Image (cartoon, rainbow, N blue to C red):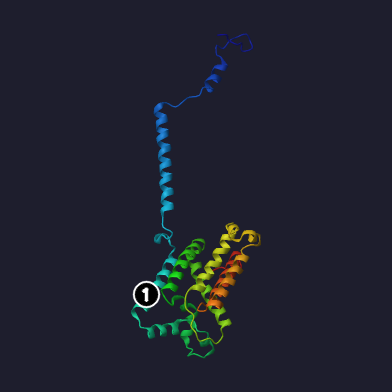
Amino acid sequence: MTNKSNGNGNSNGHDPDHNGEKEKIVKFPTLAERDRIRKKQQAEENAYRKSYRKQNEEPFFNFGNIPPFTKIIIGVFIAIHAITALTLDASSRLKIISDFGFVPSKFLGGQGWDALSLITPITYNFLHGDWTHLGFNVLMGLALGTFVERMFSTPTTIKFFFLCGIGGAVVFYLLNIGADTPVIGASGAISGLFAASILMMYEQGRMGRLTGKLANKGPWPLIFIWAGIMAFIGIAFGGVAWEAHLGGFLTGAGLYRLMRTGKLRL
C-alpha cells in the first residue's frame, strides 16, 4: 500500500479512499431478516384483503350505519302505517287521512277548516296509502336520506326535509286550489332529497355518465327531464300527486343552491 503525502512530505498513514469504498458496500439482509420482512408484508396484504372483503360484503343498507334522522323518520313512517293499516277500520283510516292529510280546500274555508289544518303541510308526510306506497318511499328515503345526511349535518337535514315537504304542499295547493282530495306521503320531501343528491353528484364530478353530451350544461338537463317525467306520469295515469313531487324537487334544488352560495343557512 502506498501512502500519500499530506503536502509537507509527511504521510498520515491513512488511505482516504478506504472509507469511500466502505460506503459503496451494499449489505444484503440475512435469511432471518428476509423472512421477517416477508412475513410482515404478507400480514399487511392479508389485513388489506380482509378489510376490502368486509367493505364489499356489507349489505347495501347497514342499519347501524344509517344516520340518526334517516333511521328515525323511516321507522316512524313504518310504525304509523302499520298501526293505521293493521289496527283501524276503513272509516277510521279515512278520518285520519282527512284530518292529517293535506287538503287544499280546507285553506279556503270550504271543508271544515280548523287549526289542525295548519300542521297538515307537515303531517301529510307521515301517511301512506298502502304498503306499496310506503315501501317505495322507505327505500328511496333510506338511500337519499343517508346520502344527504352524511353530506349535511343531522339538524340541517331535518329542516331541509320538512321544508321540501312544505314546498311540495304549496305547489300542489297552487295547482289544485279548492281540491277536496287529501294528499298523503313523503314523496315531495324525498324528491327534495333527490334534487340535492343530483346537485351534490354534479359538484363531485359524477354526472358525466348520467347526462352524456349534456354534461357540460350542468345538472339542469337531468332536473328538467325528471320533472317532465313526474308530470307525465301524474297526468297520464292519475293517482299520483305529481305537483307535490315537483314542488318538493324544485324546493330541494333551490334550497341547495342557496345554501351552497351562502345565502341561506339551515
Vertical placement of residue 26 versus 79, above or below? above
Q: What residue type is disc 1 on?
A: Ala
Residue found at the very far left of the displayed protein = 87
Q: Foreground: 221 or 55?
A: 221
Mark 1 crowd level (few <14, some 14–19, many ≥20, 10 Å Cα): some
- Is residue 53 visible in the rendered structure shown here? yes
Residue 145: image location, x then y, percent: 48, 65
Can you say which quadrant of the picture contains the C terminus? bottom right
Residue at the (48%, 77%) spot, across then down: 122
Can you say which quadrant of the picture contains the N terminus? top right
* Residue 93, picture quadrant: bottom left
Residue at the (41%, 73%) spot, across then down: 131
Residue 129: image location, x then y, percent: 44, 77
Residue at the (38%, 86%) spot, across then down: 91
The residue tagged 1 is 82
* Residue 98, picture quadrant: bottom left
